[in-house]
Structure formats: structure tokens, C-alpha cells
Amino acid sequence: MFDTLSGKLTAVFDRLRQRGTLNEVDVGEALREVRLALLEADVALPVVKTFIAGVRDRAIGAEVIRAVAPGQQVIKIVNDVLVEHLGGEGSSALDLNHPAPVPILMVGLQGSGKTTTSGKLALRLAKRERKRVLLASLDTQRPAAQLQLAQLAEAANVPSLPIVAGETPLAIAERALAAGRREGFDIVILDTAGRLSIDAELMAEVQAIRAATSPAETLLVVDAMTGQDAVNTARAFNEALGITGIVLTRMDGDARGGAALSMRAVTGAPIKLIGVGEKLDALEEFHPERVASRILGMGDVVGLVERASETIEQEEAEKLAAKIAKGRFDLEDYAAQLRQIGRMGSLSGILGMLPGAGKLLAQVDESKLDKSVFKRQAAIISSMTRAERRNPDLLKASRKKRVAAGSGTSVQEVNRLLKQYDDMAGMIKRMNKLGQKGLMRHGLSALLPGRRGPF
């Protein structure tokens, strides 16, 4: 997401950086291009006008025009205004500081991912916050909706309210809260019914449920891929319910990003969570400053580190570190690294979190970032004997043919894997020879073949 907007803004700022000084005409031209980029990204027109006015007021001043690096200063101003429009700095965490059981009401249109998000949220609260969570489906409109939530609850390993045929949504909500109080749950997530479009019946139903349950959070779930429709949906629900937060789903898709930039300005409610994939654990906190940084091509290194810390298994990593310290690294270790990377999500998503990676992604064919290459390499390694994995030098021509046939790949792919392994093993040996002091003295260039001394 944001790739097109990020590319256009990066091009504008690259031109600004090349100029030694800036005048009002330069800033005006740059802002016109920024305005067009925002409109093409499906940002609401009133939001675009407010955004550009905010940047212009700060950018056209003597302190910017006379600055040593005025282009960089303008970029900093755009970043600050972006952060403000996305919700401002600081945490937008869920408000759970209420007597248990804390009710969380999930609302939205049908097809927005509301039920799936309810399951993801339950898993997140149970796993990260160590909360006892009860899931309850109030959706009596959509066939099998209650069964779907029950299955998601089972997958997330959290309890769900037993289904009673013929109950009204309001009765289900009251039964869920009663069960929460009786059985000592910390949080009760109420998944309401949606409609294909906003209508009076839908709003009357969710208003009645909200009045009866007094939720600590009323979270509107909207699909980021629907652009301006998502903004219109948010406005309507906010006027009827006074939502406390927004969850944007499908933020990992190719949406133009306008919904995220418009939500706070249109509703006054913060984006609290974002869905970044189909898996149950693909739900993340929304950090305005990090998203602004990614839009401007500066990456999200903090987010990348957090994702790695959540997915990398500590025990496995410590075993590998111990082996590397002894100068040992075989194909079994290489396969373990492939599994760790595979758990972190799509490669394009990982690369998008690195500073300056936007241009690289634009030049690389998306198919080359397909994680299936990891699965193929894992299959190749699995087709080897234990002796071959521990000593790859055993893999001569006849053995390579056997491994290729057993893994459904080609000898060329086996050779490519072995070359990548050799490169990594060689780098680890150089690291081991240098030691920590040597690495610090020589810099990372010491790890590169044929390079001596610092860069």
C-alpha cells in the first residue's frame, strides 16, 4: 500500500534536494505536484486542501528558504503534517482501562472483514495482553456468520459464546456480557451484523446494542481497498454511533492509501489497528509516524524489528548463534533461516519497511519476491540426506540429480541454492575470523569478497 503515492512524492523531493536554495515558486510547484499525488491516491479533496495549506504555511518562510538544506526542511515539514493528518504522534492503543468484562463493539459493512478482524483481535489480546477474551457473534443476518466466528475462535484458541438459535442480536449481547461477568472474562468482543450498504435498519440495530452494552471501544472495520467509499462509510457510522476507533483491513493490498490519510480528518477518530494479511496474527497497531515515514520512502525499521522479534524463535536463534560462534553453518541451519524469514510475511512487505527500498521495489518484478522460492529451497534441502545437509561438499552431479528429482525442481535450482549457501557460509567464516574487534575496526566492508579496509 502507498507504493504509488510514495513513488510520486519521492520524485518530487528528489528534485527539491538537488536545488541549493528554494524560493516561493519552487515550493509552490512542489506543492502542486504533492496535491496531484494525494488526489490520485484517493485522498478526500477537503483533506488535500487542508494538508497543502498546512505545508505551505510552514514551508514559505525565511527560516526555510535560507536554510542550509531547504529541500530537506520541506520534506521534514511534509512529514510532520502527514503525521498530524494520520493521527498525530503517540499511541492509539485500545482503551481497556475499565471494569471487567470490557465490551468491545465491532461494527461495519458486510464484506469489510469485520468477523475475521474480531478473531484477529481476540488472538492479539489473548497472546499479547494475556487477557481472557470471549468472542460473541451478534450477526443473525448472514448465513453461517455465527459458525464462522466460532471457527475463528477455535483457531485463535479463545472461547466463543455458544450459539442459541432464534435469539435477537440484543439478547445475544446481553447473554455475552452476563457470561463474561459470571465466568471471569477480561474482554468480550461483540461482532455485530453488517449490510451491503448503510441503511436505517442497520444503524438502529447497532445503536440499540451500543446503548445496552456501553462498550469501552466502538471499532469501525473498513476495507482500505474501497478508497472513498471507506471514508463515506466512516462518516456515516461516526455520525450515528460516535465511533472510538477505526480498523483498516487489507492494508497489505495495492490500495492507493487515500482512506488512511482521510479517516482522522473526516471522523476525528484514530485509526487504531490495521489488517496486513489473511493470517490470524496479521493485525498490527497503527503508528502514524511510521506510516508517514514509509510514505516518504524513509522506511519503518522499528516496525521491521518488532515483526522480527515476534516471529523469530529465540531458542532456535540462540542455537544458531552458538554454532556460528564456532564457525559452523550447514544446510540445516540455512533451512532454519528460510523458515524464520517465511514467518515474517511477504518479501515486498519486509523490503517496504527498509529506508529507500521504494525505488528498489519499483525495479524488481513482484514475482521475484514470491515466497514460494523459499518453499522450493526448503523442499530441495528436505530431499537431501542428513549427511548431505551437514556436508554439502558431498553433493556431486549424480546426487544433485537425485535431489532435484526428489524435490520436483531442476539441477540448476539446486546449484543456485548451493551457491547462495556458499556465499552465506563464506561470510560467516570471515566474521568468525575477524571477531568482534575486527569487525568494528574494518567495518562491514571486511565481509565483502575482494574488499579490504573500510568503505
Image: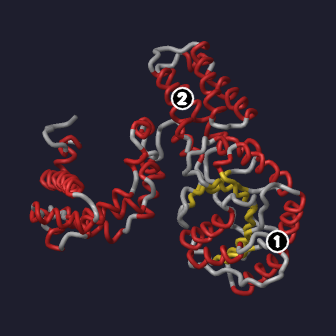
Query: Are the residues flagged by discs 1 and 2 in contact, CB closer than 8 Å?
Result: no
Q: Which residue is mark 2?
A: 75
Tag on residue 332?
none
**The furthest residue to the bottom:** 182
Quadrant holding the C terminus? top left
The residue nearer to you, when weighing 9 against 181, is 9
Question: Is 318 placed above or below 277 here?
Answer: below
Q: Residue at x 54, y 69 (%)?
A: 128
The residue nearer to you, when weighing 315 against 338, is 338
For mark 1, give the secondary structure: helix
Mark 2 surroundings within 10 Å by alpha-carbon count, few (fewer than 14), some (14 through 19), many (20 or more):
many
The residue nearer to you, when weighing 117 against 178, is 117
For mark 2, give the secondary structure: helix
Query: What is the total number of numbered labels drawn onto the structure image?
Result: 2
Q: CA distance from mark 1 to mark 2?
A: 46 Å
Residue 61 appears left or right of 323: right
To which quarter of the image does residue 375 belong? bottom left
Question: Is 32 placed above or below 162 here?
Answer: above
Q: Residue at x 12, y 53 (%)?
A: 433
Q: Residue at x 45, y 57 (%)?
A: 345
Residue 55 appears left or right of 243: left
Disc nearer the start of the sequence (1/2): 2
Mark 1 surroundings within 10 Å by alpha-carbon count, few (fewer than 14), some (14 through 19), many (20 or more):
some
Tag on residue 213?
1
Q: How is the image coloured?
A: secondary structure
Amino acid at the residue labelled 2: Ile
Percent position (x, y) of residue 360? 40, 38
Visible residue check, residue 424: no
